[in-house]
Image (spheres, rainbow, N blue to C red):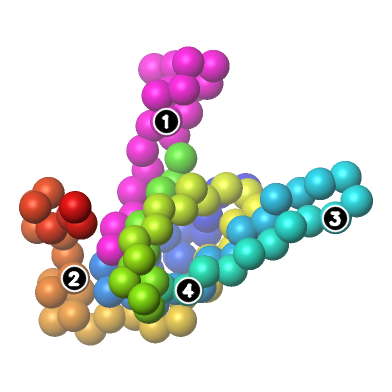
Amino acid sequence: MPIDAEIRKQLVPGARVKVTQQIPARDYAWATAITGTVVDYEQKETGSWFAHSKNDKLWLDRLVIRKDDGEISTLNLDEYSVVQVETTPTPGEQAANTKKNESNLPV
């Protein structure tokens, strides 16, 4: 199940989110939660050779967040991911957090 369109609109730079992801197993599900501030959200192709969809690529929802300790994490969102938007940024905060060019990326 893809991410709800309403939540997708809220995944803008500066928004504070909590993402819970699960890995299903036969008898249990392994869950983990991560909280941080949205740096970027986009749909990107995987480059996977076995994915047979548009242009033989599999498109994934990718969310880049900055955790409270400064760590940058890229999350691939799937049907087992639950995204909760805790706060949305003001227009000024959103403009300040928007990626302007590739030099903004951590080294």
Q: CA distance from mark 3 to mark 4?
A: 23 Å
Going from N to C along the chain, the mark reached first, 2 or 3, is 3
Q: Residue at x 29, y 58 (%)?
A: 40
Badge number at residue 28 = 3
The correct choice, above or below, for 50 with respect to 8 in the image is above
Going from N to C along the chain, the mark reached first, 4 or 1, is 4
Q: Which residues are magenta?
A: 37-59
Q: Position of residue 22 (x, y in %)?
A: 68, 56
Q: Position of residue 19 (x, y in %)?
A: 53, 66
Badge number at residue 35 = 4
Name the residue beneath numbered marker 2.
Answer: 97
Q: Position of residue 65 (x, y in %)?
A: 36, 64
**Is residue 2 found inside the magenta-colored segment of the image?**
no
Q: Is residue 4 visible?
A: yes
Going from N to C along the chain, the mark reached first, 3 or 4, is 3
Q: CA distance from mark 4 to mark 1?
A: 24 Å
Callout 4: helix, strand or loop? Answer: strand
Going from N to C along the chain, the mark reached first, 2 or 4, is 4
Name the residue beneath numbered marker 1.
Answer: 46
Q: Depth check: give the residue in front, 49 or 79.
A: 49
Going from N to C along the chain, the mark reached first, 3 or 1, is 3
